[in-house]
Image: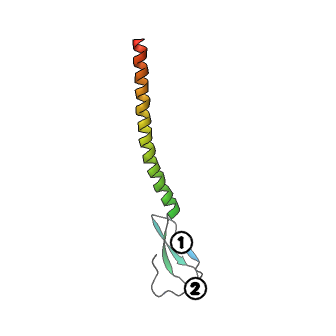
Amino acid sequence: MSVKAGSKRCPPHYFLVDTPAGPTSDGRCKKCGEVRTFCNTNPERLQDMVMRARIGCAAKAQWARFRAERDAHRDAEADGESRG
């Protein structure tokens, strides 16, 4: 968070934040003119995205094991029918 030098104090601030265009947006206090940089990504949302990616990797590995077992089972059934 950056603060413009020489800004007055006026808590509570009333920031008007620019339209999101990238990872951050600048906001200016309507009362005192203080400028701050705001993150456009909600940290909780970011953590959720990371967890989903991790779960996705684990799910892909689990799905690969399932497919291998399924294919082995199908091959065994096919061998039994061709001999039968």
Circle 1 crowding by C-alpha within 10 Å: few under 14, some 14–19, many from 20: some
Please give the count of numbered marks on the rendered protein: 2
Left or right of 35? Residue 11 is right
Q: Residue at x 43, y 26 (%)?
A: 73
Residue at (56% x, 76% y) in the render: 15
> 7 or 18, which is in the foreground?
7
Q: Amino acid at mark 1?
A: Val
Element on which disc 2 rests = loop
Residue 1 position in % (x across, y down): 46, 75
Residue hosting label 2: 10
Decide which of 64, 43 is in the foreground and name it.
64
Using the numbered discs, state the Cα–Cα distance from disc 1 to disc 2 in whole angstroms.
17 Å
Marks 1 and 2 in Cβ contact (< 8 Å): no
The extreme top residue here reads: 84
- Disc with the residue nearer the chain's start (1 vs 2): 2
x, y percent for residue 71 = 41, 28
- In the figure, residue 81 lies in which quadrant? top left
Task: State which quarter of the image contains the C terminus.
Answer: top left
Nearer to us of marks 1 and 2 is 2
The colour mode here is rainbow
- The kind of secondary structure element at disc 1 is strand
Residue 12: give x, y in percent of width and height: 60, 81
Q: Label 1 belongs to which residue? A: 17
x%, y% of residue 67?
43, 33
Amino acid on which disc 2 is placed: Cys
Vertically, is 1 above or below 66?
below
